[in-house]
Amino acid sequence: MANNTITDRRDLIARYIEQARLRDALRELRIMVSGLHWSLQEEVNNIEDSYRMMLRYAADGVDDPGRRQVYDRIVSRMYGIIDRVTREHCKADSSTLYFNTLRYEHLQPGDTIPSLFAQYVKLQDDNSPLNLITSSSGDSKSSRREIEEMERRLFNRIWVTYPLSSDDTLALTDAVSSQTLPQYFKELLVSALLMGLLAYYDERRLALLLDIYASDPSNAVAIKAICAALMAMYIHRTRIGSGTLTGKIECLKETVPTWHKDVRMVFMQFIRARDTERINRKMRDEVIPTMMKLRPDIYKKFHEDTPVVDLSEMEENPEWQELLDKSGLTDKMKELSKMQEDGGDVFMSTFAHLKHYPFFSDIANWFMPFHLDHSVVTGAAGAAAMTGEIIAASPFLCDGDKYSIALSLSSIPEQQRQFMMSQFNAQNLNAAEIRNTELLADESRRENIANKYVQDIYRFFKLFRRKGEFADPFDTPLNMLQVAPLLDDFSDEETLTLVSEFYFKRGYYADAFDLFSRLSELIPPSAQLFQKMGYCRQQEGDIAGALKYYEQSELLNAQSLWTLKRIASCYKMLGKPRHALEYFRRVAEQKPDDLSVVMNMGHCHMELGNPDKALKCYFKVEFLDEKSSRALRPIAWCSLLTGNIEQSRRYYTRILNETPASGDYLNMGHLELVSGNVRDAINLYKLSIENDRGDSEAFIKSMRADTPVLVKNGVDASTVPLVIDALLYQIG
């Protein structure tokens, strides 16, 4: 059976299981294993026998408290067969990195996870400081490379091993709990477990991650373990219903005091990861282009004002600051700074260009915690002895980005290296020290570890040169509310409030609305909550739904101008200008000089066929806001509708002299047509089409729509189609 056929059938079976159509899923599974080893066929038969027995009990009305567990076990066994079959088919000829690595590992006779750990422990012992001092032979650099090669081997072996055996699990448990093995290595093991788990579901592997977390929840290894476990739980959310695993999760909830906070914290990091692409676009489309435009001006200021190039002075020089303010860069940088303070990944776009080094061709290195003994770091330090320490001290960079800096430093001349490191000046170091002091608080420290770890994972799946071979867990939102065993972790008022506001602040309105809805069932009716629910619906395009919640908010707080405005805008968008006008008037009673309200009142009068009343509103806006031109077009058009041709002409003339648009040429053409100047009208109509990308069909549609206005102002209706055709002949 071809790999693509296997994949298609696997996906079909998974869809049937998700739809609770196990009969159809079992039928397809039987086809999948036909012609394969008899033991697989026998296992499928046993699964179906169990399912048929469960169905008979259900049909007989037997109340079976263990039915859910039996069902989950059947599903788990089905998924297990699917994984084994697809894996065996791919193992022979798949060219992906995973299966290339798997085939390599199978060619190493006698190597197992426990035996590789034993070799690694011996290498660490042989290269301990004491042994290196007493040993007369041996090269520390080559020894370091040996250790790093073994770390890579272990990562790869753990990654492609499926399923983990009890011996594998024991060896991993011993390694993580070891008092002698380095901390960074234990963190690397967690990532190896995660990558293997993302490739194929392995309950023992997931349980091990949870055990690592439970062993010492404050430890960096444990924090990364809970990040990995939760990511895997979401990816395999349809497969974690077995009694063993859910029992373990329930036990953790009862025995680990920080479980609830940690689950919530990691979920926040997953939500932050969704912001990364938006931040990248802002950097790429706004910040960097603005900075490039400013370069000549800034360079000029450098040479006019001072021979000393000190970037810190830019914040102190009012002339330079004026450049930044005028460009809008200051506001953009403040926004990015706020994103960074809130845990946003503002460095992704910067460091994406520094992942071309051979170091990043090896999957293990994407997850290698930054440590001073690594050959990349020692190689980068050179004459700058503090380089590694300075990079390591940065609380703002994830491990992969720290290695990017080290690699960059190692590939440039010493003078440039010194200049780059000078950017980590005393001011930056002080900021880092302050940040590190803040991180001494356990909760902040834990959050920073989780934040940077998720960033490392995100970078791998977005930037790895062979990323197309991996299913990207960030392609869809990692919504932990869809993981059944965790539902009660997000059911209390405090958590629902925190997470919903987190979603709301970032513009994920559908997710926020879902949580606000759940929250509304737990707390007394709240005007503010209904406001936010309405706003979420409005942002999602559900205007009628938004209006419903805004009106509920009004019942609780009839004086809220914000709510009244929103209700008015919803009515207007729903084509109910009379209702909209009523609410705009209520706002105007309290804020008569709110020009946006006055403008909208004018628009409502227009929709109701009252141009005279509309004009009064528009004139008020023009009078109170002399610097703005927003009322010019409505005044010009209303004047035409009311037959005040000269007034309309004055305003359209102003508009054409300032910021003319296609519609302005059209309406000025109407004025000339009404005045009997047909050739002038045709010329203006021609300009209208030209300014609308030559769209003559749109012009014809507008002319037909405006014909009643022209006729009302004395134009013979039969003239309009003649003018249109005359123009069309002109433009060919």
Image (tube, rainbow, N blue to C red):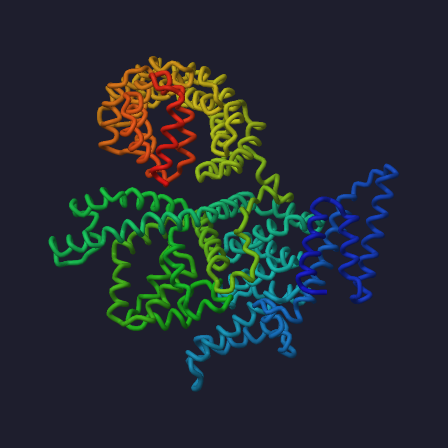
Towards the viewer: 435 or 102: 102
Q: With respect to residue 528, does 164 lie above or below?
A: below
> Height in image: 69 above or below 500?
below
Please, which residue is most extreme toward the bottom here?
136
Report the side of 232 relative to 509 (left or right).
right
Of 435 and 727, nearer the camera is 727
Q: Where is residue 114 in the image (x, y as percent from the top left)?
A: 62, 71
Q: How many marks?
A: 0
* Quadrant position of residue 58: top right
Q: Nearer the viewer, residue 586 or 84?
A: 586
Q: In this view, does 688 lie to the left or right of 32?
A: left
Q: Can residue 632 be seen in this view?
A: no
Image coordinates for residue 670, horizontal then vertical, percent: 32, 25
Location of the C terminus by quadrant is top left
Q: Is residue 265 visible to the viewer in this orientation of the structure?
A: yes
Q: Which residue is drawn at 25% across and 23% down?
A: 649
Q: Quadrant of the N terminus?
A: bottom right
Q: Left or right: where does residue 708 sit relative to residue 50?
A: left
Q: Position of residue 728 (x, y in %)?
A: 37, 36
Give the residue displayed 19% in from the left and 43% down from the top.
Answer: 322
Displayed quadrant of residue 420: bottom left
* Residue occupying the point 57% across, 28% down: 522
Q: Where is residue 504 in the image (x, y as percent from the top left)?
A: 47, 36
Examine the image and state in which quarter residue 393 appears: bottom left
Above or below, 710 relative to 371: above
